[in-house]
Image (cartoon, rainbow, N blue to C red):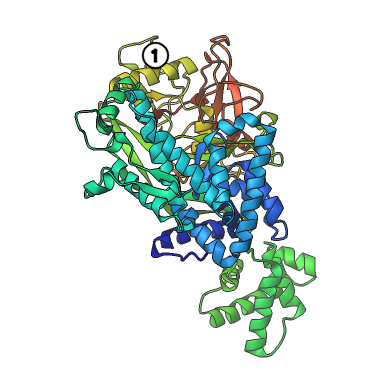
Amino acid sequence: MILEISPEHRSAAAQVDRFVQRFEPSYRQLAFYAALPLVLTPELVHYLRNRFLLEAQVPWVAEVDLLLSDLCNPVGYEQYAIEPRIRSYLLASMEQEIGWEQMQQVARLLLSYVQQLAQANPELLQYRELELQQWSAMVYLDDRRESVVQQIGAAYQALIDSGKVDAQKASKLLLDLDRLTRITQDFAPYLRDYPELLKYADLLRRLLDEQEGVAPELLAEHFEVLPGMELVVPALLLPSKGEETKDDFWQKAEVEVITIEYSDEPVLERYEFEVATLRMVENVLELQDVLKIANDGMQELNGKYLSDIQHNVIEGIWNNMTYAEMANTYGFNSNYIKRVARKLFQWWSGDLGKTVSKENMVAVFANVAGKSLKAGTEIVRVPGSADQFVESLGDYVELVMVRIPAGAFMMGSPADELERFSNEGMQRIVTVPEFYMGKYPITQAQWLVVANLPALEQDLPLDPSGFSGDDSLPVERVSWYDAVEFCRRLSVLTGRVYRLPSEAEWEYACRGRTTTPFHFGETISTDLVNYDGDYIYGNCEKGIYREKTIPVGSLNAANIFGLHDMHGNVWEWCLDHYYDSYQGAPTDGSAWVDSEIDREADRVIRGGSWFNFPRDCRSATRIKNLPQTSSNEIGFRVMCEIPRTL
């Protein structure tokens, strides 16, 4: 069975290539094997890597990198699915590069794995995901494919036999039909020997999508998918004959659905920004580089090597010595050393076409060598873009909200992260729905507008902040209760649901698909973050200690989502109660709160502040504070829920 890579696969191929280029070539092999199951779990990906890819030296971290990449989407608790077009491309490529026989071997192992799960946990048989895994394995096996067709046909028949149902059951039936047709079409390349099943699924898909041009005779046709198994169009999808139709059922079902009332959908606009990355400078100029350039130049100009005194002068300039210090160190008269240096500068200036002096010699040679002057870090900025909407608060004050796409990430810090705290583990994968988050922490100007609105549960101080002089400074000295009241008033003002972010939402938004201590890299700089620069983290250098807050966004240090100031400046309140570890914490992005805990129990703050050490500003750092606490180190930012039907 040979699959061809179609033109539709081109974008998928480019996406896979980008994923592989971010890491290493062996990641492509893992993507191949992970494409065969319809639903992935961390355990299953680990199982596939151990059974098939140990010799390929695929690192264990590739499992997490794959599940958290844009190739996969979270579909449930610790469950992921590769996007259909990408999965189709990977399977086609896998067959060409690895071969059909190997794919069948993987399928048999997958089927055995699923059966072992079912035997160990019989209750799992009721879950659709297990059924999907069985089908996705069996469809690749010549001796099991007909059994898959029989089971899919039986599933269709069960839906056909549902008969007349009420609105609630009808909506469920429609969802089940939608699911089943999509699965059938996903398996289409391997079900070519069963054209009637594919024709049937295609017809239902067209009816579900309300496509025009469905021939009336098709609606009454019987599709013999297997000998003795005929399928017909469910009554719910047939045109109305005085009975309720699919649309009627949906309309009735909607009445029973709980909805959240929102104001008009926000108008999103695309905006451009720069994503900051802090990287270590590796290609650093050394003394031997300078001596080699000088020696090569001397040979080319005079046919001679550097003399001892010339060598000493260059070494002295490298070490930032005065001529007097050189004379004292090397045993020569200082005027003689000056004459030697001037002669060298004269030669180099003529050779390089640029004036060389004692003050700029090292910089000139660094430029010639194409190297940096010293070790350290450098900031690299690359273009980024995101969707945002602007909320007008009145008094010419606006609140900018950025769309944070749904995704999954590894929450917490690894055991080997530098200067981590014990409450940052154990690490686990958390899935987070799409939401909007403030581009910056709430400013003093925004606070003043909302604080002047009518009180809902408590009064708010109009000017709580300890730092002043610029209304774009983040508001601080606000308690958790104050921040919650602010969100309630903002919700009433705008007609949208605003609240504090959960701890998981905050860290997901902060990391911006990174796994490093900071969203810009392994270390930190006061050029990007407002913290106590008298202290260092890892290979960073000491920087500025500003001893106060600074205007939001002023350091131009956005992450990939377009959020600013997620590290430093002010701590930010989260909704969650504080716990000493993640043991028992939600994995769906929701806040970890307990209604039975005392109302004044500790809440979580994140991100670090102007006053803190660099370790406190890491993505994973989490500390506790009493909800009534107010400090000039603590502010907050808001999130807005995506309008959705529950």
Question: Given the image, on which type of amino acid does mark 1 rest?
Answer: Leu
Residue at coordinates 49% horizontally, 40% vertically from top-left? Answer: 407
Q: Nearer the viewer, residue 350 or 214?
A: 214
Q: Is residue 619 above or below residue 183?
A: above
Please tell me how crowded label 1 is: few (under 14), some (14-19), or many (20+) other residues with Cα within 10 Å: many
Q: Nearer the viewer, residue 220 or 371?
A: 220
Kindly tell me whether residue 526 is visible in this rendering. Answer: no
Could you tell me residue 367's position as x and y percent? 56, 70
Residue 39: x and y, percent?
54, 43
Q: Quadrant of the C terminus?
A: top left
What residue is pinned by disc 1? 460
- Compared with 105, 446 (above or below) is above
587 relative position to 55: left or right: left
- Residue 117 or residue 596, whichever sits in front: 117
State whether residue 543 is above or below residue 454: below
Give x and y (percent) for residue 230: 40, 45
Q: Secondary structure at mark 1?
A: loop
